[in-house]
Image (cartoon, rainbow, N blue to C red):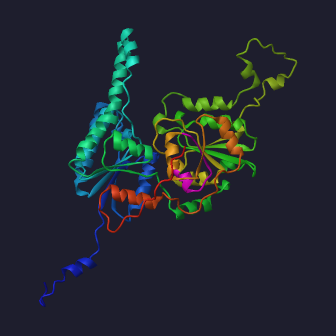
Amino acid sequence: MDDLGLDLEPALAARRPRRRPTLAIIATGDRLCGVAAYAAALERHLAAAFEITPIRLDQYLLRGRGRRLRRFGDAHIAAICRDLPRFDAVNLQLEHGTLGARPEDIYRRFGALLAAAPRLSVTFHTLPLPPPFPHAEFARAAARLAWRHAVRLWLEHRHARLLSAALPRRLRRAQRQKPVSAIVHTPRNRRDARYVYGLDHVFDHPLAFLSAEEAAAVRRRASRRNFPLLETLPEHAVLVGVFGFIGHYKGFHTVIRALRQLPDDYHLLIFGGVHPNEIGRHPQRHAYLTTLFDEAETGTTLYDRLADKPQITLDAARGLGELFAASPRDLSARIHFMGVLGDDEFLAGMASCDAVVFPYLEVGQSASGPLAQAVELGCRVIASRSHAFLGFAEYHRAAVEFFDIGNHLELATRLRARRQYPPRDGLAAYNIETNRAVYAAANGPLTPGPAPRVPARAAPVR
């Protein structure tokens, strides 16, 4: 009340700017990790609704296996926990391995973060389900008195259940005392989190990285001329790109086999390299990289191919030069390793390809960052029919062409055919705006005003 008897507090409160709620986003700080790239994009997109504080998980400390390093990892988590009560909400970008190398460490550290957060939303980038116990194999091992194998089976099952059953049980108990929610990336994972994990508040949304303006800027600057490794290729060359760290589950073998069924002007570009965690001490070459070279028959001759067939008699007078010349099946000139690139070059390379292929095997993966980015850029996307990619297509209709996992003939046929879906302009139905709405809802009624409506999904892809 002022001297005239007027109550000015409501008017002053209306003019006073409303405080943005504080949100801590806990994620790995490893720049080569896909979760870190998504967390960085998320921090940009949520800045309009929240006062964001990124909290980075130190992978050197958390993934240490020695007793001393594990203690430092626990101390690192304890320091984070002491800081969490000051935030309105906390979001954990959970890829289980980023909390530790051992299931016991992951479970313990997750429990500490859960207890310290005033309200917690967990973004599950992988959603492991409780596995059945291998009764038959365990019985056979016990019957043979192979106790070491039997104990290993029991320990593996115990460790798997620690992350797929005991960890969700902690979340179920916590949601009785504080707001707890889960964010997943496929409709199937949403059902698993609701009915298997037993969580009350579950939201689903595909990964989202780029705004319409950012995607348009990438397309404008994308050009083959920006990559020196492609300068020797003819202008009419058809570029097929695969993206991500080189590993067995990526299924790059399938694309190499498909390359044999395609004309010589089709070239395979591999954007990525061996993951730093898999760089060995003494091997001259990563084991999976060696299998790719063998599949492409790089550096082989006709003699090498016939060397294991002693029943064939070689006539030195006939085509000795051809015998030791490069094999006609050698694909060295059509496969190009582009290396590990920065974010801008990575996206520019994706936009420069005529087709972007994701030939992944089924390993229980929930989402793929490069797949989401390729769709946002309007690329021609061809993906294997895995659960994660089929779930992604339920959000983005008419955006992904599919082939059966490992079917290189179907992939080659698709690559030679015309594009199935026309390029899309502007934002898709599920984008950074709808993703912001999901995070606003998952972290409680904290933001002022109505949240943007998340569109309904189309019918599932069969």
Kindly give the residue lying farthest to the front in the view shown: 459
Residue under the image location 42 percent in, 54 percent down: 40
Q: How many marks?
A: 0
Between 65 and 390, the one nearer to me in the picture: 390
Q: Position of residue 438 (x, y in %)?
A: 39, 57
Task: Locate the C terminus and report the quarter of the image it occupies.
Answer: top right
Kindly give the residue lying farthest to the right in the view shown: 317
Between 130 and 283, the one nearer to me in the picture: 130
Judge whether 5 appears above or below 340 on screen: below
Q: Is residue 338 magenta?
A: no
Report whether residue 147 is seen: yes
Task: Locate the N terminus and report the quarter of the image it occupies.
Answer: bottom left
Give left or right: position of 260 versus 344.
Answer: right
Give left or right: position of 55 versus 244.
Answer: left
Q: Is residue 373 magenta?
A: yes
Kindly give the residue lying farthest to the bottom in the view shown: 4
Q: Which residues are magenta?
A: 372-385
Give left or right: position of 70 versus 429.
Answer: left
Residue under the image location 73 percent in, 48 percent down: 237
Q: Position of residue 261 (x, y in %)?
A: 72, 36
Between 230 and 247, the one nearer to me in the picture: 247
Q: Position of residue 87 (x, y in %)?
A: 26, 57
Judge whether 88 appears above or below 106 on screen: below
Q: Position of residue 285 (x, y in %)?
A: 56, 30
Judge whether 197 appears above or below 151 on screen: below
Give left or right: position of 214 versus 89.
Answer: right
Residue under the image location 54 percent in, 35 percent down: 361
Report whether residue 53 is seen: no
